[in-house]
Amino acid sequence: MVINSRFFNRSELLGFLALAVLLLLILPLSLDIFRLNLVAKYLTYAFVGIGLVLCWGYGGILSLGQGVFFGLGGYCMAMYLKLEASSVANTKIQSTPGIPDFMDWNQITQLPLFWKPFHSFPVTLLAILLVPAFFALIIGAAMFKRRVGGVYFAIITQAIAAILTILIVGQQGYTGGINGITDLRTLHGWDIRTDHAKFILYFVEVVLLFGCIVAAQFIRLTKLGRILVAMREQEDRVRFSGYSVANFKIFAFCAAAVFAAIGGAMFTLEVGFMSPSFVGIVPSIEMVIYTAVGGRMSIFGAVWGALLVNFAKTSLSESFPQLWLFGLGALFIAVVLAFPNGLAGVWADHIQPRIDRLLASRRSKSAGLVADGAPAE
Amino acid sequence: MLVGHQPKDFLLAVSGLTVSFDGFKAVNDLSFYVEENEIRVIIGPNGAGKTTVLDLICGKTRATSGSIQFRGQELTRLRENEIVQAGVGRKFQTPSVFEDLTVFENLEISYPRGRTVFGSLTFQRDDAVKQRVEEVAEMIFLKDRLNTYADQLSHGQKQWLEIGMLLIQDPDLLMLDEPVAGMSVSERAKTAELLNRIIKDRSVLVIEHDMKFVEDIAHKVTVLHQGQILSEGTMEHVKNDPKVIEVYLGH
């Protein structure tokens, strides 16, 4: 994809470059590997945020169940890693060697059928993208074809997040239960627990993130992006312009699901385990808050939102563990009441114009001195 | 009157159309026929079911019974977007345009190409699209406002924009719900001029209260009252119908 001035406008290009400098240079050079790994963890939520910008910001579809797709992506990756860690040699003390340890503890003697495809790495990569997309397709088709929308859709997605959590916790023998899938070691033979691996994984994740940013920007700039905005405002007018509104909503929801799943898969790799505590209602709502704080209409805003809120969460919950949830709630209320377009909105409405004015006044000054007005600085 | 099924030369054949909302029949056993290139105006007192008839034809409301045939195609079984693709365009009473998009983008969305999800992902704003958008923008007096966001437009301009969005669809049957309502006198005159230009080569179904406007454009008038046809014919005929005078014009 050629990044030209049409694809990113001036301020978007600057935003892209600023983010690239921060993530690829400043942070890796200034942080130790523990902190860098934390940043990597924060960034996994940026993937979810990008999906929410398309689905919620543009399409007006508020999903309070993005944890489901984050979890599905994460679990797909975890299942592959777990199978690799559960080789016969590693598990010879179990009563059934060669199956994950939690299955053995739950008296399961054979690998369940749905685990078998995850022996293959290519199949796993496909599953990370396709399983959440398929799941979103089913939910989307069931809801949007029946014209369920707005608050009702939000509540149903939230219920689905709760149901999936209960299912994972309840089916301990198949899913690892409340502990999740732990003790993950290698990815295709490559040890992911070392500092060096974490460093490499961080860069893989940042590259994937930029890939997702470009993909989301591409969708935003096609006619489909404009139809999403149109749909948010005047659903009927879109329908009576000859479009199947349900299909466009399903697409937006599926796209958001795939972005979230990529984040989830990276989360498993960065953090080294996956558990139902990243699937349920609370993490799903937190993901929406990151996006709202960053700015639900801005792809870059969503990335900044995920980084900053998570950074605040880590620093605050280290010092005041009980206060954090109240802080997060207050932050959300403040953003919704005072800055409906989040940090990106504050930037675009208050900071950007000042910078522009400053630059413009400088330029006119230097234009007075230099004939062609090219700023020397 | 007409026995058996509609002959082929009717563009739109509505027969035995009934819709009931919790037992209240907003439209009751209604039958009427619109020919190719005919301009039909529906008038009637408030609550007569005029807007409901348009809602039924465009699929916004589902009929309880009866049939709507458009070029021999049964519309009551189609989805809204399929009805649009069959060639029926509808303008709503209150202007419904996309306020967060520009005039150009509003018109472009209505351009009849790339209407599927993947079609819209691969849609290119080529010369044919630009030319058509500019052509229509000129017709609806918005040529110099193409890059204006629609929320900056006046009420009348929004109405024109929505008419433009319909024009770009190039429907065979155009349905307009009170196109001049809420407009200033000068806007009204301009709209009448606009409508007179765009109604060529297509059939039009208009709901309107402005009697002068109706007289200007109507080929045939249908008077609705309590979901049923009270009278139908030329404006002259309808105006002199004692039943019409009693329930509608006399007031």
Image (spheres, rainbow, N blue to C red):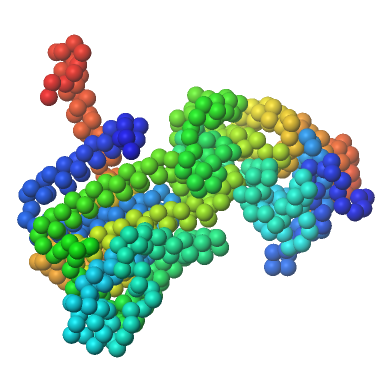
Number of numbered callouts drawn:
0
* Residue A154: quarter of image: bottom left
* Residue B78: quarter of image: bottom right
* Residue A311: quarter of image: bottom left
Percent x, y of residue B199: 72, 32
Foreground residue among A166 and B1 = A166
Residue A161 visible, this angle: yes
Residue A63 visible, this angle: no
Q: Is residue B67 above or below residue B186?
A: below
Foreground residue among A24 and B38 = A24
User: Furthest-top residue in view?
Assistant: A371
Q: Is residue A214 above or below residue A325?
A: above
Residue appearing at x 19%, y 63% in the figure: A189
Q: Is residue A339 above or below residue A328?
A: above
Q: Is residue A263 above or below residue A94?
A: above
Percent x, y of residue B165: 58, 37
Residue B131 as seen in the image, left or right of residue A306? right
Foreground residue among A71 and B220 = A71
Percent x, y of residue A365: 16, 18
Residue appearing at x 32%, y 68% in the figure: A118
Residue appearing at x 33%, y 82% in the figure: A110
Residue appearing at x 38%, y 42% in the figure: A218
Residue B153 as seen in the image, left or right of residue A64? right
Percent x, y of residue B136: 59, 28
Residue A277 as seen in the image, left or right of residue A123? left
